[in-house]
Image: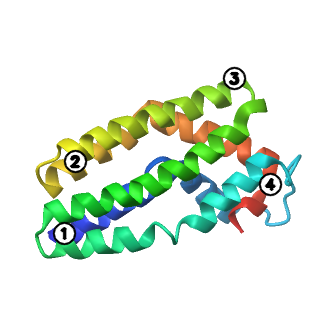
Amino acid sequence: MMRQWAKAGIGIATIGLAMTLVPALSASASMDKSAKGSDPSSPVCHAYRSALGSDSKGSAPAAKAAKALASGHWAAAKKDFSTAFSDEVNEFHGLVSALSGAPNKVKRAASELLTSGDKFKSILEKSNSAAQFSTAASSLFKSPKAASAGRTLTKYATGLCGSSITS
């Protein structure tokens, strides 16, 4: 059971706000890999590529958290999840900055994901167990608002950057 919590927690913590990239990754599997975006050299595309490239940076704290969870040490896992999540938040802020010229709908989607990130941080801080954390965080990121915001950002980024953001 602890391994399931570790896997769920790692997925939530390392993806966190960068969950906007997940639909892009899965969508790219069915897209023509040669699809070009309208402006693949834009700051938004650079920010997405940077976030994709930094996923490995957040994997060290997430791996530590998984080990701590597998050993039943929630306090240590919580600290490492917090570190991994902070890394993701920093990357997402870079993306949000790059969205300054984006349509209002896209900016609102980014704002919604930042709000979800604040809620996620609160859930993490208040959780007394891995089970409590996993349940609350999973429902947060499955919420219709967060899912819609992720789709909006993915659609915008894919149109701008093409399928190259995920290759």
Disc 4 to disc 2, how far (Cα)?
34 Å
Disc 4 to disc 1, how far (Cα)?
38 Å
**Would you name the residue on which mark 2 appears?**
135
State which tag comes first along the sequence, 4 or 1. Answer: 1
**Would you name the residue on which mark 1 appears?**
69
State which tag comes first along the sequence, 3 or 1. Answer: 1
x, y percent for residue 79: 26, 59
Disc 2 to disc 1, how far (Cα)?
15 Å
x, y percent for residue 82: 33, 55
| Circle on res. 145 | none
Q: Are marks 4 and 3 in contact (CB under 8 Å)?
A: no
Other residues around mark 3 within 10 Å, as few (<14) / some (14–19) / many (≥20): few
Q: Secondary structure at mark 3?
A: helix
Is residue 147 rendered to the left or right of residue 118? Answer: right
Give the residue type at disc 4: Gly
Disc 2 to disc 3, how far (Cα)?
32 Å
